[in-house]
Amino acid sequence: MIFRAYGLRTASFARSRRVITFVVLALTFLGAHGLTYGLSTVFSVRPTVETAPVPSDNDAADDIAVWTHPTDPAKSRIIGVDKGSGLGKGGLLVYNLDGTQRQYLQEGALNNVDIRYNFPLNGQLTDLIVAS
C-alpha cells in the first residue's frame, strides 16, 4: 500500500502518515483474518469476478499481479501463474479485468509474478512483468 501526499512535507505530517498507515494495515490484517480483537465488525469479502481454472490440476493457480494501464484503467490486466509441473504444464496467464483469459504463455512451472513499472530499456521506459 502506497500513500502519497502532495505539498505537505512537515515532520509532523510524516509521523502522522506512518501512524495512519500502521492503523490501516492493522485493521486490514484483522479484517482479512476474521479476527475482531475488540472490534465489533468483521468484514467479509466476496469475489465479483472469477477466472476460468488454470490448465494444470491440483490447485496450480498461484500468485497474481495487477498491471495498471497508465491512462485507461479499463485496459488494466491481471497476470497469474500456473505452477503446474510435468511435461507441458505451467505458465503465465493474462486476464482482462472481467476474468476472461487473453493469453497463456506455457513456460513450465512458475511460482511468483511481479511487475516493475517504468524500467529503462533501450532508451525508453517500459513496464516489465517477471515470473520465477
Image (cartoon, rainbow, N blue to C red):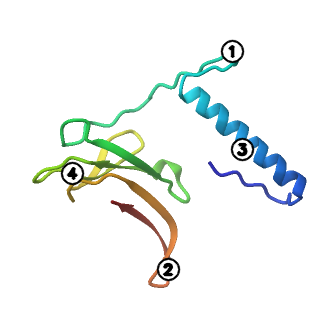
Pointers 3 and 1 in contact (CB under 8 A)? no
Give the mark nearer the N terminus: 4 vs 3: 3
Q: Residue furthest left?
A: 87
- Which residue does the image show at 52% across and 50% down from the upper left? 73
User: Seen in the image, is 61 located left or right of residue 118?
Assistant: left
Question: What is the C-alpha distance between the residues marked 4 and 2?
Answer: 31 Å
Pointers 4 and 1 in contact (CB under 8 A)? no
Circle 4 SS class: loop
| The image quarter in which residue 37 lies | top right
Q: Residue furthest front?
A: 37
Residue bearing mark 2? 124
Residue bearing mark 1? 40
Give the mark nearer the N terminus: 3 vs 1: 3
Give the mark nearer the N terminus: 4 vs 2: 4
User: Seen in the image, is 130 located left or right of residue 110?
Assistant: right
Identify the disc placed on residue 90.
4
> Mark 2 belongs to which amino acid?
Gln
Circle 1 SS class: loop
Mark 4 vs mark 2: in front: 4
Circle 3 SS class: helix
User: Seen in the image, is 111 located left or right of residue 11?
Assistant: left
Identify the disc placed on residue 21.
3
Question: What is the C-alpha distance between the residues marked 2 and 1?
Answer: 51 Å
